[in-house]
Structures are given as structure tokens and as C-alpha cells.
Image: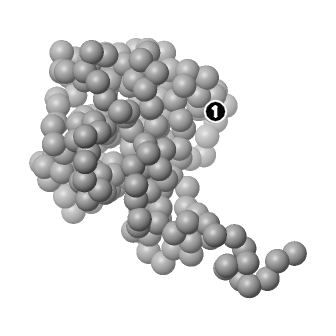
């Protein structure tokens, strides 16, 4: 069974973390470990019809944001990776600078030091040079920056379609099968014409 850490930080876009938990549960064979920042918990109420306890119920294990003695704070607790969705610029900065004063950043730091998959879904826009520099630096450290950007070739009809596609691409990065996204099959299959 795969063990995946799902972190939700204080950026807008908590739906990406929520939907990831839902889709990982549906996929089966995945044990999820959740960390939510206090601002993420606030955003759950602002951006969704859910309460933080509803999100916590989607995970197999949930931890307090301040519990830096939790099992996932140690590299000896083996996981198959971590996703921070959505990832705030503050959290990104903490990860880049190894400022592990909370469990969310500590768990990400463990993934980096042990060369485990770390996927960040930043939602901030527009970006200034400082943000771009942090993306570059975290990429050099081994993380994957995967902003949730819609794939228009899939011709999304709803917000759920857009969210699901981004979540499916993250599941691809974790090597977890997902059959709910439309895959690119070439322009000929879409329009019937080529150059």
C-alpha cells in the first residue's frame, strides 16, 4: 500500500487538496496522511461547503499542524511522497529555506532530504520575481512544481472538470492510476485535421 502525505496550506485553492484526498481514496491501495495549516482550515469554510472535520474525515490519518513529533516528521517513517495542494508562497518559502517550524514544512523537508517525491501546487497569481526564484530553487532541490492550470484540449465544462484534471496529473506524478481525466490523443483525434 502506498503512503502519501497531503498537505493543505493557506493559499486559495483548498479544493485541490480536498479533491486529491477524495480521488486517492477512490483509487484504493493508498493510505493518506493529512496536514492542514490553520489558514487552510479557515479557507475550507470560505471556499467550500465543507468544514475542516469533513476534510479530516477523508484522510486515513490526520496530524496537528504543530505536531513536529508526528511519525511523518522523520525519514524513518517511509512514505511514497507528498503533495502540498494548494501551496502558499509562505509555505513554498519555508520549504526552500528549510524553515521547518511546523509539521507541514518539516514533512516536506523530510521528503526532499530522503529524495522522495514532493509535488507543490502553488495557486498564487500573478507572480513576482521572488516567487519565480523560489520555484526555481525548490526545483533544484528536487521538488516538482505543478501549478493547477487547466488543460483546454480536454474542453472542460465545469469547475470540477478543471480541478479533476489538475488532480489527475498530480496522481500521474505519484504513479497512481487514474481513469477520470481525458488524455491527449493527438490533434487528429480531436479535429480530424492535421497541418
| x and y, in percent, of residue 169 in the image | 49, 53
170 left or right, relative to 142:
left
Query: What residue lies at 43% left-to-right and 26% top-to-bottom?
Result: 116
Determine the residue positioned at 40% across, 55% down: 177
Q: Is 190 located above or below residue 62 in the figure?
A: below
**How many numbered circles are shown?**
1
Residue 155: % across, % down: 56, 75
State the image coordinates of residue 173 (x, y, percent, origin top left). Answer: 48, 44
Q: Secondary structure at mark 1?
A: helix
Considering every residue shown, the one lying at the far right of the view is: 195
Between 60 and 63, the one lying in front of the other is: 60
State whether residue 50 appears in this view. Answer: yes
Q: Residue at x 22, y 17 (%)?
A: 68
Foreground of the two, 128 or 52: 52
- Indicate the colouring scheme: one colour
Instruction: State which quarter of the image contains the C terminus.
Output: bottom right
Task: Residue under label 1, please give it.
Answer: 132
Residue 98 horizontal side relative to residue 186, left or right: left
Q: Position of residue 156 (x, y in %)?
A: 51, 73
Tell me if mark 1 has few (under 14), some (14-19) or many (20+) residues whose alpha carbon lies within 10 angstroms of its own.
few
What residue occupies the far bottom of the structure in this picture? 192
Q: Nearer the viewer, residue 165 or 182?
A: 182
In the rendered image, the vertical position of residue 6 relative to residue 90, given as above or below: below
The answer to whether one can see residue 152 in this image is no
Quadrant location of the N terminus in the rendered image: top left
Measuring 47% from the left and 50% from the top, which residue is drawn there?
172
Amino acid at each position: 500500500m502506498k503512503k502519501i502525505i497531503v498537505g493543505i496550506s493557506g493559499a486559495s485553492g483548498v479544493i485541490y487538496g480536498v479533491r486529491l484526498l477524495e480521488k486517492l481514496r477512490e483509487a484504493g491501495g493508498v493510505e493518506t496522511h493529512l496536514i492542514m495549516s490553520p489558514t487552510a482550515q479557515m479557507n475550507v469554510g470560505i471556499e467550500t461547503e465543507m468544514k475542516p472535520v469533513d476534510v479530516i474525515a477523508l484522510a486515513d490519518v490526520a496530524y496537528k499542524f504543530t505536531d513536529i513529533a508526528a511519525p511523518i516528521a522523520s525519514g524513518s517513517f517511509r512514505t511514497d511522497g507528498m503533495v502540498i495542494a494548494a501551496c502558499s508562497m509562505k509555505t513554498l518559502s519555508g520549504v526552500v529555506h528549510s524553515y521547518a517550524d511546523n509539521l507541514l514544512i518539516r514533512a516536506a523537508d523530510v521528503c526532499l532530504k530522503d529524495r522522495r517525491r514532493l509535488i507543490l501546487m502553488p495557486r498564487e497569481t500573478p507572480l513576482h520575481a521572488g516567487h519565480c526564484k523560489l520555484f526555481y530553487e525548490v526545483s533544484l532541490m528536487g521538488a516538482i512544481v505543478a501549478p493547477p492550470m487547466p488543460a483546454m484540449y480536454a474542453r472542460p465544462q465545469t469547475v470540477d472538470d478543471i480541478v479533476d484534471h489538475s488532480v489527475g496529473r498530480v496522481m500521474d506524478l505519484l504513479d497512481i492510476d487514474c481513469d477520470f481525466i481525458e488524455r491527449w490523443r493527438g490533434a487528429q483525434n480531436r479535429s480530424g485535421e492535421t497541418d
